[in-house]
């Protein structure tokens, strides 16, 4: 018996010539489940909450207060909260799905062999990369909207002096590094968790892997939290005008 | 030695050397956060999420090394 670990997700079937991988399938599956649960609660909204509704309300309130405390402004928080909280819920559910017992046994027979139907969606770089691109592109849009197109470009191409010019170019590298750091952090953690679980199960079955799975549960929560909070922090950084800029505008 | 051996050696070296820096950094963050909570226990609710975010940022260099090692092994 060998270890079966692959970096690329397995193709489970084709629609036309479009390959459907199991990571894609899981992300759609999670989206449908999350939508169904929250739509059900929204439809049965009562003044006197049931126990489950109260739980969801507490979750939303706490999350909103946290977002407000980081971004420091209720109006801004209202605008950014839906995106950040959706990211958090989606990543959390996609990560926790892999800890449901028995789901790894569900397989599908294809032409290339037997493929598992479920896979940690965040252990596929494509899914993580798309989510990162959403947040990074949004950061740039927010920065352009707040500073104006010329103010935005002026941050990168600064001709006040050789040092400022160099620092401006470094900012471009910084923006590109954000893509790499945000996406690799989530992908690396979840994929490493999967590999660790598989290796421990391979070396010493049944009881030794349990502590590692608890660690994986912690990682699943913390990484969902970190991804959404970092998106929030980057966007709030892009949406604030630095003090020296304000001084400059005042002096003009 | 065969190419396969170099592959495993490279993966081990990549993650082993890459983890040193972020291990030191995370240790410092954890110790400082605990120190702060010890001095002022009421702030633990505020410090803990910030500690996790700071740790995740520090961790990223180790994660790059890990991703490189995993790509060498399984890619």
Image (spheres, grey):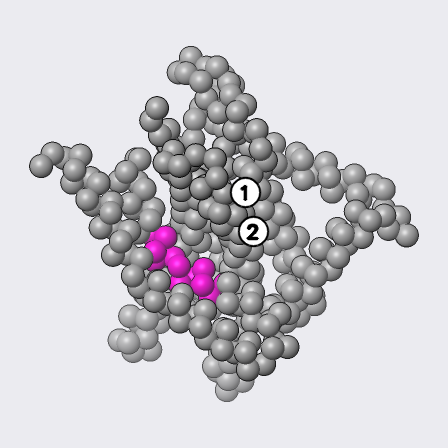
Q: Tell me the element at label 2.
A: helix
* Left or right relative to B39: residue A189: left
Q: Does residue A131 appear left or right of residue A154 in this picture?
A: right
Disc sitting over residue A221 in the figure = 2
Classify residue B75 by image quadrant: top left
Residue ID at (56%, 65%):
B49
Q: What element carries label 1?
A: helix
Chain under callout 2:
A
* Front one among B22 and A28: B22
Please say whether residue B57 is one of the residues in the magenta stretch.
yes
Give above or below for A248 relative to B2. below
| Mark 1 residue crowding within 10 angstroms, few (<14) / some (14–19) / many (20+) | many
| Residue at screen point 76% across, 52% down | A55
Q: Mark 1 points at which residue?
A: A95
Chain ID, mark 1: A
- Tag 2: Cα neighbours inside 10 Å, few (<14), some, or many (≥20)? some
């Amino acid at each position: 018996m060998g270890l079966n670990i692959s970096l690329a997700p397995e193709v489970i079937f084709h629609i036309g010539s479009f390959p459907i991988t199991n990571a894609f399938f899981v992300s759609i599956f999670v989206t449908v489940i999350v939508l169904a649960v929250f739509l059900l609660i929204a439809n049965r909204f009562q003044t006197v909450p049931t126990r489950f509704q109260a739980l969801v309300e507490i979750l939303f309130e706490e999350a909103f207060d946290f977002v407000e405390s980081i971004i420091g402004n209720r109006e801004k928080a209202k605008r950014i909260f839906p995106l950040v909280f959706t990211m958090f819920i989606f990543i959390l559910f996609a990560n926790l799905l892999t800890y449901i017992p028995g789901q790894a046994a569900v397989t599908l027979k294809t032409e290339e062999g037997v493929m598992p139907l479920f896979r940690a969606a965040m252990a596929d770089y494509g899914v993580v990369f798309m989510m990162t691109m959403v947040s990074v592109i949004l950061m740039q849009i927010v920065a352009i909207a707040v500073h104006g197109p010329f103010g935005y470009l002026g941050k990168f191409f600064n001709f006040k002096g050789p040092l400022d010019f160099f620092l401006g170019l470094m900012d471009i590298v910084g923006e590109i590094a954000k893509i790499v750091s945000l996406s690799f952090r989530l992908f690396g953690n979840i994929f490493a968790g999967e590999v660790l679980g598989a290796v421990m199960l391979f070396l010493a079955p049944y009881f030794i892997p349990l502590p590692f799975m608890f660690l994986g549960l912690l990682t699943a929560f913390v990484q969902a939290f970190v991804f959404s909070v970092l998106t929030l922090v980057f966007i709030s950084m892009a949406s604030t005008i630095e003090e020296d800029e304000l001084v400059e505008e005042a002096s003009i | 030695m065969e190419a396969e051996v170099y592959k495993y050696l490279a993966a081990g070296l990549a993650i082993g050397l890459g983890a040193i820096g972020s291990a030191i950094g995370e240790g410092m963050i954890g110790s400082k956060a605990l120190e702060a909570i010890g001095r002022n226990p009421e702030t633990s609710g505020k410090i803990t999420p910030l500690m996790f975010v700071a740790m995740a940022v520090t961790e990223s260099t180790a994660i790059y090394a890990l991703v490189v090692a995993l790509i060498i092994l399984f890619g």
